[in-house]
Amino acid sequence: MQSIFTDVSIPVQNETIKDLLSTGGMAGMLNTIWLILTAMVFSGILETAGILHKITETMLKAVHSQGSLVTTTVASCGFLNLTASDQYISIVVTGRMFSKSYKDQDLKPEVFTPNT
């Protein structure tokens, strides 16, 4: 349990291997975990306030085919990544924005999944 929460250091002769094996334990991943949690909360606020629906509605006016839906998804994900400067927020928010549209267009979920 201690190795999960505290620094881990394995004594080896080679400095390069020592650097690879020495970690900050679970605490080293907390920044990433906070980013993911913040992205989910931000997405939830946007959805609950109706902002996400309004933005999605406006963007979907230009969508007339499956290809344009995918293009719109990629563009919005890229825009969010640039403006929010965080890939987790762009993935979560875009996922919430377009999930229903992909179901309506009879596209498989694999097409929509950003990390496949």
Image (tube, rainbow, N blue to C red):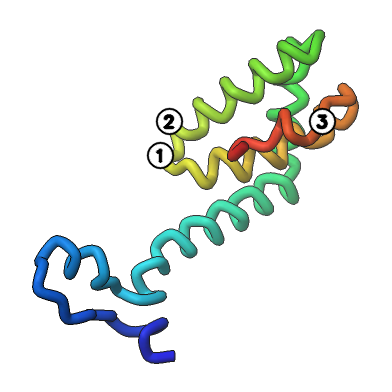
Coordinates of residue 33 in the picture (x, y in percent): 48, 63
Q: Give the alpha-carbon distance from disc 3 to disc 1, as whole Å.
A: 29 Å
59 horizontally vs 114: left or right: right
| Amino acid on which the number 2 mark rests in the picture | Leu
The residue drawn where x is 68% and y is 53% is 44
Tag 2 secondary structure: helix
Q: Which mark is residue 31?
A: none
Q: Secondary structure at mark 1?
A: loop
Tag 2–tag 1 contact (CB < 8 Å): yes
* Residue at mark 2: 82
Along the line of sight, the residue nearer the viewer: 25 or 21: 21
Q: Which label sits in the foreground, 3 or 1?
A: 3
Give how far across and how far down residue 88 sits, in percent. Answer: 52, 46
Q: Determine whether 20 is above or below 8 in the image.
A: above
Amino acid type of disc 1?
A: Ser
Q: Which residue is mark 1?
A: 85
Quarter of the image for residue 109 reads top right
| Quarter of the figure with the N terminus | bottom left
Q: Which residue is mark 3?
A: 108
Contact? badges 3 and 1 (CB < 8 Å): no
Q: Nearer the viewer, residue 69 or 108?
A: 108
Instruction: Pick whichever, 63 or 10, lies toward us.
Output: 10
- Of the image marks 3 and 2, the number of the one nearer the N terminus: 2
Alpha carbon of mark 3 to alpha carbon of mark 2: how far?
Answer: 27 Å
Which sits earlier in the primary sequence, circle 3 or circle 1? 1
The residues tagged by marks 2 and 1 sit, at their Cα atoms, a distance apart of 5 Å
